[in-house]
Image (cartoon, coloured by chain):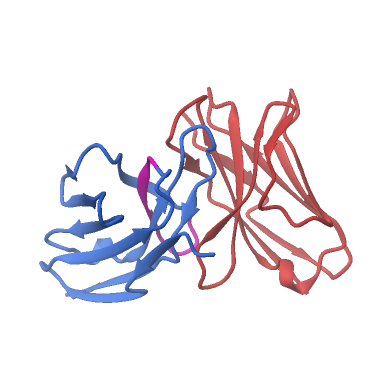
């Protein structure tokens, strides 16, 4: 059973470009979460999605950030017009329905130059 | 507002010793307390978890102690090994809300 998959693993973008991060949950998991980890800091919750629904986006910056989990295909975290402060590791996690446990992917390390 | 406070931020332990990491929480609605282990360049891996209806849970060399009245919980790593060197995060969540709140992390180094 493959774990949570994220791609790309490393992404370099220039200021003002768009970044698209992809996450495929574990087989059988219908809930997806995105977290951001800044250097030397803990993980901060961004958004919680189920198929075709955003359940909780309370940790998402109000501008430039969006997330989706379509009926088919991976979940996408999209960052428009990236700035240097967006440089971080972005982790996706997944869980089965109504389960406490969340399982994390390897992360996408975004560098904005 | 830091809802889960973790200490120490760094810890050096000799091989064979006991590593102890402490966490405290504020929100009494939390009902699930996992610990994650993260190696450099990797994602966090679920290590062990506890719910507030038990005071202790042990899995191999890893033990969680939970004190509901004090709103504190801790991770003990017995017979620490160099392979345990990693960053450890305590966390808390509320069933139905799913959002996990993490502590700041403890960087553990086990020296031979």
The relative height of residue A70 versus residue B45 in the rendered view (above or below) is above
Picture quadrant where residue A86 is located: bottom right
Q: Position of residue A53 (x, y in %)?
A: 73, 29
Q: Position of residue B15 (x, y in %)?
A: 14, 70
Using the image as rendered, state which of residue B104 and residue A9 is in the foreground.
B104
- The residue lying at 52 percent from left, 24 percent from top is A97
Q: Position of residue B54 (x, y in %)?
A: 21, 39
Q: Position of residue A6 (x, y in %)?
A: 62, 45
Q: Is residue A64 left or right of residue A7?
A: right
Look at the image and say whether residue A107 sits in the magenta stretch. Answer: no
**Is residue B87 among what the camera can see?**
yes
Across the whole image, how many numbered discs are drawn on residues? 0
Q: Is residue B38 left or right of residue B11?
A: right
The relative height of residue B9 versus residue A27 in the rendered view (above or below) is below
Chain A painted colour? red
- The residue lying at 54 percent from left, 44 percent from top is B99
Look at the image and say whether residue B42 sits in the magenta stretch. Answer: yes
**Is residue B43 among what the camera can see?**
no
The relative height of residue A28 versus residue A11 in the rendered view (above or below) is above
- The residue lying at 44 percent from left, 51 percent from top is B27
Q: Is residue A17 left or right of residue B112?
A: right
- The residue lying at 37 percent from left, 41 percent from top is B32
- Span colored in magenta: B31-43
Q: Quadrant of the C terminus of chain A?
A: bottom right
Chain B painted colour? blue
Using the image as rendered, state which of residue B61 and residue B20 is in the foreground.
B20
């Amino acid at each position: 059973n493959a774990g949570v998959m994220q791609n790309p693993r490393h992404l370099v973008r220039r200021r003002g470009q768009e970044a698209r991060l992809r996450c495929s949950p574990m087989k059988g998991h219908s809930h997806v979460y995105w977290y951001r980890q800044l250097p030397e800091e803990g993980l901060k919750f961004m958004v919680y999605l189920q198929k075709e629904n955003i359940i909780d986006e309370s940790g998402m910056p109000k501008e430039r950030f969006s997330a989706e989990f379509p009926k088919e295909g991976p979940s996408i975290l999209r960052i428009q017009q990236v700035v240097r402060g967006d440089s971080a590791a972005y982790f996706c996690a997944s869980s089965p329905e109504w389960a406490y446990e969340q399982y994390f992917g390897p992360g996408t390390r975004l560098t904005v130059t | 507002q830091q809802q889960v406070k973790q200490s120490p931020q760094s810890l050096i332990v000799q091989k064979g010793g006991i590593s102890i990491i402490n966490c405290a929480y504020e929100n009494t609605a939390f009902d699930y307390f996992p610990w994650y282990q993260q190696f450099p360049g990797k994602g966090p891996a679920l290590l062990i978890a506890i719910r507030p209806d038990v005071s202790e849970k042990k899995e191999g060399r890893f033990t969680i102690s939970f004190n509901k009245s004090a709103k504190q919980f801790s991770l003990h790593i017995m017979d620490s090994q160099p392979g345990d060197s990693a960053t450890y995060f305590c966390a808390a969540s509320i069933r139905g809300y799913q959002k996990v709140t993490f502590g700041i992390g403890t960087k553990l180094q086990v020296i031979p």
